[in-house]
């Protein structure tokens, strides 16, 4: 009984989030004037739109969560993280469309591929670190991006057009069973977050944090840091691959853009907005990024990308610890943001005077 109370107390934030998001389609349906049975049968127009937007946010949050474990917790800055996501998305599409495998076999295949990918990246871990690892990871991801864009792979990947017409199992079809898809994506996100929190608090997770802070000191204490980084890499790859699979099942086209550097940068931006190493910041950042992008594109159009980029730069300058990080340290100092901007504009000798 005490353990149950302790679990609820420690995780009340994510559990409240889960409850609110679970009820959100029905609450929107009430405003729309639709009955719960209408929402359940996927006939509510506004609630169905909210479900779709929620699914996109949950997938982004899942991807960002995997990136936060690798970068925010373990200190591995990868510019090829989108490869985990993209490979899973393409393998899901190819397995369902070309190989026509049963869904459970597709899930098993994606999990195996996720582990293989992580081990592939891990081959370079004992030999490179820091900026070198970042560049190597970018190189590996670039190779995959070139492969999926190749005209020789058009029958499998769709080349630059993307993979289209993936048959989604009827029980999770985003067209006829969107609410079920929404609940599955939300549940997977919440469970992953809880597992991540448990991992970070475990002895293995604490060693990963020690590696981020000072890998040399962790080695001096007798830890084989490569092993711990491989563990973090595998967990991160499995999570990003789960997000990639959901993306393939939800989106009508698997675009090659999910395999390029831009998608990794999206994950990095989400983590920076929410707070590096906070875990919950990945969820907060995904909401902020997707809703901001949707709102600006809705009212401004093509100029939204430029304005969004400017907002992100300003945000990082004034809120360097992210939303969750700033809330935790309870320190918001806009003056430091202005000092950074002035440091770019004025020469250093003027600032000193």
Image: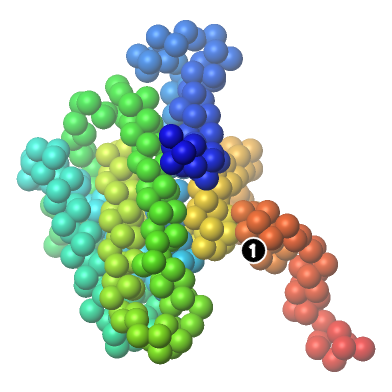
Q: Which sits in the foreground, 175 or 197?
A: 197
Which residue: 49% across, 23% down? 23
* Secondary element at tag 1: loop
Percent x, y of residue 83: 30, 63
User: Which class describes the residues within 10 Å of circle 1: few (<14), some (14-19), or many (20+)?
Assistant: many
> Could you say which quadrant of the image residue 248 lies in?
top left
Judged left or right of residue 98, residue 216 is: right
Which residue: 20% across, 53% down? 111
Name above or below for residue 264 compared with residue 298.
below
Name above or below for residue 185 compared with residue 27.
below
Name above or below for residue 196 compared with residue 208.
above
Count of marks overlaid on the render? 1
Q: Which sits in the foreground, 252 or 71?
A: 71
Which residue: 28% across, 63% down? 234
> Could you say which quadrant of the image residue 107 lies in?
top left
Q: Which residue is mark 1?
A: 321
> Could you say which quadrant of the image residue 64 lies in?
bottom left
Percent x, y of residue 3: 43, 41
Percent x, y of residue 36: 44, 11
Is residue 13 visible from the viewing direction of this image?
yes
Is residue 255 visible from the viewing direction of this image?
no
Percent x, y of residue 255: 32, 51
Q: Which sits in the foreground, 71 or 305?
A: 71
Q: Quadrant of the N terminus?
A: top left
């Amino acid at each position: 009984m005490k353990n149950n109370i302790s679990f609820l107390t420690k995780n009340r934030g994510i559990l409240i989030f889960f409850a609110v998001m679970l009820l959100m389609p029905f609450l929107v349906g009430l405003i729309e004037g639709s009955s719960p049975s209408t929402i359940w049968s996927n006939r509510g127009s506004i609630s169905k739109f909210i479900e779709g937007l929620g699914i996109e946010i949950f997938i982004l949050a899942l991807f960002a969560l995997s990136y936060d474990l690798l970068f925010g917790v373990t200190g591995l800055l990868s510019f090829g993280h989108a490869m985990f996501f993209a490979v899973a998305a393409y393998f899901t599409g190819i397995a369902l469309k070309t190989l026509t495998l049963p869904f459970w076999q597709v899930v098993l295949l994606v999990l195996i591929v996720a582990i293989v990918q992580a081990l592939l990246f891990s081959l370079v871990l004992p030999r490179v670190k820091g900026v070198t690892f970042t560049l190597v990871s970018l190189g590996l991801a670039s190779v995959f991006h070139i492969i999926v864009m190749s005209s020789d792979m058009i029958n499998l990947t769709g080349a630059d057009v993307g993979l289209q017409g993936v048959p989604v199992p009827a029980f999770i079809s985003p067209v006829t069973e969107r609410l079920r898809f929404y609940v599955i994506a939300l549940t997977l996100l919440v469970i992953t977050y809880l597992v991540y929190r448990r991992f970070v608090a475990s002895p293995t997770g604490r060693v990963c944090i020690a590696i981020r802070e000072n890998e040399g000191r962790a080695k001096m204490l007798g830890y084989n840091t490569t092993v711990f980084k491989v563990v973090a890499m595998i967990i991160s790859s499995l999570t990003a691959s789960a997000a990639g699979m959901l993306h393939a099942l939800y989106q009508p086209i698997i675009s090659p853009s999910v395999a390029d550097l831009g998608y990794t940068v999206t994950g990095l931006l989400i983590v920076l907005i929410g707070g590096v190493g906070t875990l919950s910041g990945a969820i907060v950042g995904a909401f902020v990024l997707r809703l901001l992008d949707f709102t600006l594109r809705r009212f401004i159009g093509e100029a939204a990308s430029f304005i969004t980029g400017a907002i992100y730069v300003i945000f990082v300058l004034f809120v360097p610890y992210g939303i969750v990080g700033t809330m935790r340290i309870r320190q918001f100092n806009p003056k430091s943001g202005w000092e950074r901007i002035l440091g770019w504009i004025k020469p250093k000798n003027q600032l000193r005077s």
